[in-house]
Amino acid sequence: MAIQEAQLKTKQRQLQQSQSKLSYATRRLSAGQSQLNTSRSKITALQDITYQIQSRNDYNAGYNQFGEDAKRIDVLSNTFPIIFFAVAIMVSLITMSRMATEKREVIGVLRALGYTRFDTMKVFLVYGIFAGVLGSTLGAFLGTSLLPRKIFSAYAANFTIPNFQTPPSPFWISISIILSLICTLIPAILATVIMLKDQPAVLMLPKPPKAGSKVFLERFPFIWHHLSFNYKVTIRNLARYKSRMIMTILGVLGCTALLITGFGIRDSLNGIVDTQYKDIIHYDIIGVYNPVSSDQAIANYKRKVDHLADMKQHASIYYETVTSRPQGTSSNQSISMMVPKSTNNFHDFVNLRNPDTKKALHLSTN
């Protein structure tokens, strides 16, 4: 009987332990079910996944800016050489024409002695080849070593690119040599071919001066009679040598255009900096905090800003950098969007004005 009672008590204790375990497991199951329901509700609240395909210009602002600077340099490099080659052709034509005129009697003697036209032309061809090759070699050295480094240091001031290299391009160097030879040889050939059309006996005689003729200003006596003798001689000489006059005017025009373009680009860039950071933007720094931070962290940040010793004035704004791609372009433009909390003193920080009329623009409270 005593043994049966002991076994019964043991079974009762085991039953109580099992009931307590069952109760604990039930509570855990309820908690797990509650977490599962919460997770399911969060999954249900999630929106569909949106995929975005971005190129290097979209997500890398530095890459985009560096590419834009490279495009600007490429545009300039395709424009300035045209003026340089045009001036070089005019200078070569004038130089070869004067050289052929000075060697007129020598050319006549060589032709009289039986030299062919090509043999007589060799001295001018050698001069043109020497000038073209020497100029191309010097230009290739300066264009691949010195000039690119100066341009790169100016444009890449905001980039960190180590080991800047300027390997020579055989293709473009060959193109420049060919164009240089064309600019020097064609004027030399034209100047000598025109002169070799005359007979040797005519070439050995000094070239007679061109017959004088009335200039356009002589048709206006009230202007012509009031000019001094030196001015009249100068104007008549210009009218006698029209080709030299045109070449000189065009050469000076091209060189002056290059100078004005260079100084204009410099003044334009300096003017942009002064306009942006003196006339439009008046603030010195923008302090940014995460809007999803805790209220305590945001309050501590604002309190520190209020107690800065060097702070003269500050304002609260919503700041975000957005990107936009203008129509017809392949690169993005970064836009700084500022939304002030109050428009009362916003003009103290940013001066908004119409770009055409220069009149001040005022933000509305809507």
Image (tube, rainbow, N blue to C red):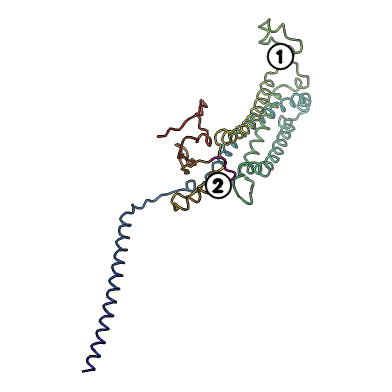
Answer few, some or many: residues within 10 Å of disc 1's Cα (few below 14, many 20 plus, some between 14 and 19). Answer: few
Identified by mark 2, the residue type is His
Instruction: Reply yes or no: does residue 312 show up in magenta.
Output: yes
Specify start and end residues of the magenta stretch as a single range.
305-313
Separation of residues labelled 1 and 2 (CA atoms): 77 Å
Give residue 357's position: percent from left, percent from top: 51, 25
Q: Residue at x 73, y 22 (%)?
A: 199
Whether residue 240 is situated above or below residue 166 in the rendered picture: above
Residue 212 shows in the view: yes
Q: Find numbered disc 2 in the image and state the secondary structure of the residue it sits on.
A: loop
Quadrant where the C terminus lies?
Answer: top left
Identified by mark 1, the residue type is Ile
Give residue 189's position: percent from left, percent from top: 68, 29
Q: Residue at x 60, y 37 (%)?
A: 77
Q: Main secondary structure of the magenta part?
A: loop
Q: Which mark is residue 118?
A: none
Residue 236 or residue 3, whichever sits in front: 3
Q: Which residue is mark 1?
A: 235
Total numbered badges shown on the rendered structure = 2
Q: Which residue is mark 2?
A: 307
The reply to whether discs 1 and 2 touch (Cβ–Cβ < 8 Å) is no
- Of label 1 and label 2, which has the lower sequence position? 1
Quadrant where the N terminus lies?
Answer: bottom left
Where on the picture, by quarter, is residue 201?
A: top right
Q: Residue at x 66, y 6 (%)?
A: 220
Say whether residue 82 is left or right of residue 91.
left
Say whether residue 308 is left or right of residue 205.
left
Answer few, some or many: residues within 10 Å of disc 2's Cα (few below 14, many 20 plus, some between 14 and 19). Answer: few
Whether residue 62 is situated above or below residue 122 in the rendered picture: below
Q: Find numbered disc 1 in the image and state the secondary structure of the residue it sits on.
A: helix
Residue 222 or residue 13, whichever sits in front: 13
